Image (spheres, coloured by chain):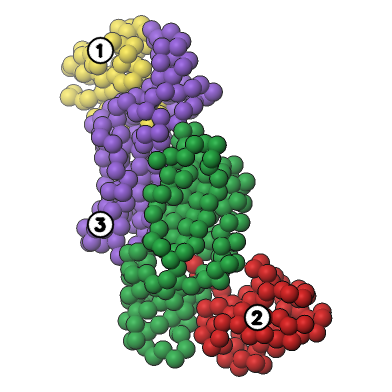
Chain colours: A green, B purple, C yellow, D red
Amino acid sequence: MSADATTIAPYSHLGPEPIDARALEARVSGPGHGAIATFAGVVRDHHEGRRVRRLEYTAYEDMAGRVLAEIVDEAARRFGTPAIAVQHRLGALQVGETSVVVAAAAVHRREALAACAWVIDEVKARAPIWKKEFGDDGVFWIEGPGSCRASGTPAGTG
Amino acid sequence: MSADATTIAPYSHLGPEPIDARALEARVSGPGHGAIATFAGVVRDHHEGRRVRRLEYTAYEDMAGRVLAEIVDEAARRFGTPAIAVQHRLGALQVGETSVVVAAAAVHRREALAACAWVIDEVKARAPIWKKEFGDDGVFWIEGPGSCRASGTPAGTG
Amino acid sequence: MTIRVWFFARFREAAGVTAIDFEVPPGTTLAALWEMVQRRVPALGQESHPLMAINQAYARPEEVITPGSEVAYFPKVSGG
Amino acid sequence: MTIRVWFFARFREAAGVTAIDFEVPPGTTLAALWEMVQRRVPALGQESHPLMAINQAYARPEEVITPGSEVAYFPKVSGG
């Protein structure tokens, strides 16, 4: 279940397959680690007051893969632990499905918690990945903190 | 797998059984929650330079149960989400076993991450639970940030 | 009044028992009862700052013990 | 030199294609190429602050494009 301490390295992955959070936690686990912090982003049923049915995630895949790798490497240096893993999903996700998981382990809890929070912040800020929202009020591109109606999609076509 | 939003309430448990982190996450999951933060405390193989073989957790059980319940209730008010769960294990735990899990869910990631970190801090600060350490250098009671050799236990009896 | 005093963790090992009943006069504080405990259990004589609880809630040394209270003394906690 | 410009997310929908090749003179910056893109794709005419990347790394508008570079323009990201 847990990796040998000497084999633990920062890990990142981007792809359409469902995310196995337990597998990511196993990657960062080791006998010297007293703390594992995990963050899961889940598709929720509302956004900016709109009822959401599903999200479609797309990416500039080559660049996003590089950015995710840079983020976990930087987190490893910044928080002094190599045990950092992130996986982001692409494609159509229903409400309740997991879009992203971060797992971070360290000797002590503060580093694990701080690394986990930092990685998800950076992923959201830097990784070239986009959500397209399909819901009762139509189809919207989500862009940073804002959103705008997708062209050629009238309201209520979700 | 996930609770209906209307049934989610702060949850706490203290007992000797292995902790099912997934079950705690399922307790806090709901269609309105976009973020789940989980913290797992794991028995590690070293402490203050000593090689650790196992820990024995004991508690002032009635009071610890109350304190855990108070902590999750206070976290729910403080971070504006009822989706907070904590479970702490008692008894003998080997290296790699999980002693405590916190799961916190919220609409947005900041509340989930902050609630998770706050709850584990409070559990460690307030819950009347103690570690007794058995290792290559003897038996030690861990007390807050410090430790002291257990009476009547010479070095190397771990 | 009779007050049952509970010990935990290292204090329990030092006392050799889980609890001891003490006969105390009305108005006795947690601090005063702790001095009685230390006289009864010399192994706790060096413990100048135990954590204290009345009825399963943390309490300060100057708090007065009321009849029927459950009192506990214990070292710094280390859960997690 | 010929530079292939990639679009993503809403910009890709607006362009109707994943990429367009542009013939640009040496010394062309990302900002200058974006103006060429906007002339070719009127639907992107209102986009004054696209994110820009050269060779799969974020780059500033004043950065000069070198031969063989992979250039991309896209809206604010929203992963997570």
Q: Position of residue D23 (x, y in %)?
A: 74, 87
Q: Amino acid at mark 1?
A: Val
Element at label 2: strand
Q: Which residue is mark 2?
A: D5
Which label is found at residue C17?
A: 1
- Chain letter for mark 2: D
Q: Position of residue B110 (x, y in %)?
A: 45, 57
Q: Amino acid at mark 2?
A: Val
Q: Position of residue A139 (x, y in %)?
A: 40, 82
Quadrant of the rendering where the C terminus of chain B is positioned: top left
Front position in the image: C29 or B136: B136
Front position in the image: A2 or B7: A2
How crowded pointer 3 is (Cα within 10 Å; few <14, some 14-19, many 20+) is rated as few
Element at label 1: loop
- Chain letter for mark 1: C
Q: Which residue is mark 3?
A: B1
How crowded pointer 2 is (Cα within 10 Å; few <14, some 14-19, many 20+) is rated as many
Front position in the image: A32 or B75: A32
How crowded pointer 1 is (Cα within 10 Å; few <14, some 14-19, many 20+) is rated as few
Visible residue check, residue C57: no
Q: Position of residue B84 (x, y in %)?
A: 32, 50
State the residue at coordinates (53%, 42%).
Answer: A8
State the residue at coordinates (77%, 82%).
Answer: D1
Visible residue check, residue B89: yes
Quadrant of the rendering where the N terminus of chain B is positioned: bottom left
Label 1 vs label 2: CA separation? 78 Å
